[in-house]
Image (cartoon, coloured by chain):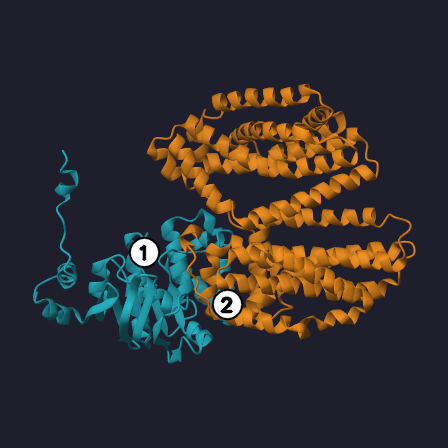
């Protein structure tokens, strides 16, 4: 069991423990911290904050249950593990440890949010929050094992969704759960931590007792032949791609369908969370002493940073997560420029949606400058920042340099702030972007990509 | 036509290919044999543009890979050793995607894809996501992807891995049709029966060097085994004879 655990942990470390993942997690934690601080500054009552935390925590338990269902009943590695003499109970214990590690990463966001909130409320952070974080992870892991067991036992996805929604609503409305436990821990009461730890131990024991039951039947049920994929999505995805050159459109269509059908789940999660950052814009702009030009600059800064994040997501993170499949596009007569354009099209379209919301906010803000001027600058800035991230990602991919890709947030920050200032002076100044050597750099990256060696372990994709 | 001259590739200390030269003419099916680590996969990756040679030149249908990689890739169909496919897409969607990437007429591509799926008995499975496919079904879909654009040159790396006997027979028929259509085809396989029956010429690669090349009779002459089958020829030419399995458990 120890050897098995060590093996699995080394696999997980190689798969998810790269600097890129850590950068993404750190960035998200920072956003969560800022959101927590902003919520406290806007006077969100502690009771509602703790209910929100409980609801978020339960949603995380739901997501982990879906992951654990796959890990317990349908993962391919089970073909290797089970014939090697791993018992059903050992498998549950192994998945429990893995789940706890995943939960530690997952709960880092609500913990950062709660820490930001608590700090703004003047509470000391100390060991209470770390204790809650460490104790709630095994609790989540145990709960998700039981959730996976229930889901695989024939509980339909719709029924599971209704149950989960009811649970979230109950926690949000009634108030018990992990949020109040953390709140009491922050106030120095040990009861909250004790309750969390006790619940974790109890549920872990229950999971070890219950989940191994009927594992073989559940595995057999989980491996039923998949049904036909709906052709509607494939056809719908063809519509936006018709605006692009054929090969670029084909790549965009592929990425849209792969994302919609569950490929790159982390990316989907980030893409869903990123718009929440826009909630900070009214908070930051609520200072009544801000003048029109300051509101405009604030909006442009937001747009620049969000454009950088979107470019990083579609231009660096997505290609890296799907590195094992790169062979498929590399053996086609595809230029680096087509690949760059396809990624840029996705990132820029997504970021333009966020930009539109930001501009809509500034348009109605009191004392703001004329919105068409801000909109022009913001649109050009979005195009520049997304392009920069995508071109940078292509270059890193061609060089096979993950470390370099990890450093992008530093460069992206400089580009975003620099061109936001330029856009503030005059929107057309962002048009200098291609003239400052960036376009030539992108051309070189595209040429490099075409001739780069593709020696990634494509067997991992199979 | 596939032409390679003086192809050399090293991974650090390991010399994967040492000056490999080879020509496969249109209408010829060439079998490339060799033990594990002989350099076959490196050769395949160089031809498909995935790996760059340290020295030497490769041309596909007259296009030099180094100078005109896009034209060379357009003229080349490649079946990798592992059937790498997007798990979330169906086989049908794969074929449409790659037809678009290759600039094919979509109507023609759909008609050909229908016939290919019929030929390989993929039927309804073609409308299901690849994630639910067996290994054999993945292989059939990957073969269909390689031949869909009907390129003048193709390389199949372990094509029958995972295929059932009927699937393997259909693949052999497909090879015969490609030959009839004057395509230059390279087959890398450890299934010696397929190579013996379907290949016009056979090359033996050992430690990155082509140590023998010719028809089956020419290989027999070279190995001085007039009645030898391909297994004997391969063992003789590479100097690797089988070992006694009883030695594995010699400790009792």
Residue A436, by quadrant, is bottom right
A246 sits left or right of A287 in the view: left
How far apart are the two marked residues, 2 and 1, measured between alpha carbons? 36 Å
Secondary-structure class at tag 1: helix
The relative height of residue A323 versus residue B153 in the rendered view (above or below) is: above
Q: Colour of chain B?
A: cyan
Other residues around mark 1 within 10 Å, as few (<14) / some (14–19) / many (≥20): some
Other residues around mark 2 within 10 Å, as few (<14) / some (14–19) / many (≥20): many
x, y percent for residue A316: 57, 57
- The residue to which callout 1 is attached is B167
Front position among marks 2 and 1:
2
Residue A449, numbered circle? 2
B105 sits left or right of A372 in the view: left
Residue A174, by quadrant, is top right
Residue found 15% across the figure and 57% down from its top: B240
Which quarter shows the N terminus of chain B?
Answer: bottom left
Residue A81, by quadrant, is top left
A235 sits left or right of A16 in the view: right
Residue A285, numbered circle? none
A228 sits left or right of B169 in the view: right
x, y percent for residue A355: 75, 58
The relative height of residue A440 versus residue A360 in the rendered view (above or below) is: below
x, y percent for residue A75: 45, 40
Residue found 79% across the figure and 41% down from its top: A38
Residue found 65% across the figure and 68% down from its top: A243
Q: Is residue A81 visible?
A: yes
Q: Colour of chain A?
A: orange
x, y percent for residue B214: 18, 72
């Amino acid at each position: 069991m120890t050897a098995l655990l060590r093996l699995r942990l080394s696999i997980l470390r190689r798969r998810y423990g790269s600097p890129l993942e850590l950068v993404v997690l750190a960035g998200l934690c920072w956003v969560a911290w800022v959101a927590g601080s902003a919520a406290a500054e806007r006077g969100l009552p502690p009771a509602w904050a703790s209910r929100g935390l409980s609801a978020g925590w339960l949603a995380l338990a739901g997501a982990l249950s879906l992951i654990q269902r796959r890990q317990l009943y349908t993962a391919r590695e089970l073909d290797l593990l089970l014939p090697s003499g791993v018992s059903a109970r050992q498998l549950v214990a192994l998945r429990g440890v893995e789940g706890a590690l995943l939960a530690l990463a997952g709960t880092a966001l609500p913990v950062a949010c709660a820490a930001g909130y608590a700090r703004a409320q003047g509470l000391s952070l100390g060991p209470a929050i770390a204790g809650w974080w460490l104790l709630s992870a095994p609790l989540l892991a145990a709960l998700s094992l039981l959730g996976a067991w229930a889901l695989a036992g024939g509980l339909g996805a719709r029924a599971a969704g209704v149950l989960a929604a009811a649970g979230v609503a109950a926690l949000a409305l009634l108030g018990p759960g992990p949020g109040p436990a953390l709140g009491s821990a922050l106030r120095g009461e040990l009861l909250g931590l004790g309750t969390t730890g006790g619940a974790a131990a109890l549920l872990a024991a229950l999971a070890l007792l219950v989940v191994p039951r009927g594992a073989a039947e559940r595995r057999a049920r989980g491996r039923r032949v998949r049904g036909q994929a709906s052709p509607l999505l494939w056809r719908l995805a063809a519509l936006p791609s018709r605006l692009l050159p054929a090969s670029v459109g084909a790549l965009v269509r592929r990425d849209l369908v792969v994302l919609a059908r569950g490929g790159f789940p982390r990316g989907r999660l980030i893409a869903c969370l990123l718009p929440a950052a826009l909630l900070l814009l009214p908070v930051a702009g609520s200072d009544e002493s801000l003048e029109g030009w300051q509101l405009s600059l604030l909006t442009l800064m937001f747009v620049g940073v969000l454009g950088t994040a979107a470019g990083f997501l579609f231009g660096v993170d997505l290609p890296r997560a799907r590195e094992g499949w790169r062979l498929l596009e590399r053996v086609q007569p595809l230029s680096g420029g087509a690949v760059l354009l396809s990624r840029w099209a996705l990132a820029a379209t997504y970021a333009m949606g966020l930009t539109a919301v930001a501009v809509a906010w500034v348009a109605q803000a009191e004392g703001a400058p004329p919105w068409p001027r801000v909109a022009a600058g913001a649109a050009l800035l979005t195009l520049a920042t997304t392009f920069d991230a995508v071109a940078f990602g292509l270059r890193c991919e061609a060089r096979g340099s993950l470390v370099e890709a990890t450093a992008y947030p530093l460069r992206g920050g400089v580009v975003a702030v620099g061109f936001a200032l330029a856009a503030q002076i005059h929107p057309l100044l962002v048009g200098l972007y291609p003239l400052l050597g960036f376009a030539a750099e992108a051309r070189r990256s595209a040429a490099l990509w075409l001739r780069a060696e593709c020696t990634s372990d494509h067997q991992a994709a199979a | 036509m596939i032409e390679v001259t003086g192809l050399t590739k090293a991974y650090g200390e390991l010399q994967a290919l040492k000056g490999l030269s080879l020509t496969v003419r249109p209408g010829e099916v060439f079998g490339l044999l060799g033990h594990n680590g002989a350099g076959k996969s490196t050769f395949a990756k160089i031809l498909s543009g995935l790996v760059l040679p340290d020295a030497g030149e490769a041309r596909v249908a007259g296009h030099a890979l180094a100078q005109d990689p896009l034209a060379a890739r357009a003229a080349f169909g490649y079946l990798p050793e592992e059937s790498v496919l997007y798990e979330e897409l169906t086989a049908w969607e794969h074929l449409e995607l790659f037809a678009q990437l290759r600039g094919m007429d979509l109507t023609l591509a759909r008609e050909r894809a229908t016939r290919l799926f019929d030929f390989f008995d993929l039927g309804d499975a073609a409308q299901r996501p690849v994630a639910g496919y067996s290994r054999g079904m993945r292989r059939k879909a990957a073969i269909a992807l390689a031949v869909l654009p009907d390129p003048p040159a193709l390389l199949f790396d372990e094509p029958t891995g995972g295929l059932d006997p009927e699937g393997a027979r259909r693949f052999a028929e497909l090879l015969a049709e490609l030959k009839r259509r004057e395509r230059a085809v390279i087959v890398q396989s450890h299934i010696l029966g397929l190579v013996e029956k379907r290949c016009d010429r056979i090359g033996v690669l050992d430690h990155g060097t082509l140590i023998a090349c010719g028809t089956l009779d020419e290989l027999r002459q070279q190995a001085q085994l007039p009645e030898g089958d391909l297994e004997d020829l391969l063992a003789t030419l590479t100097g690797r004879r089988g070992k006694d399995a009883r030695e594995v458990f010699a400790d009792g």
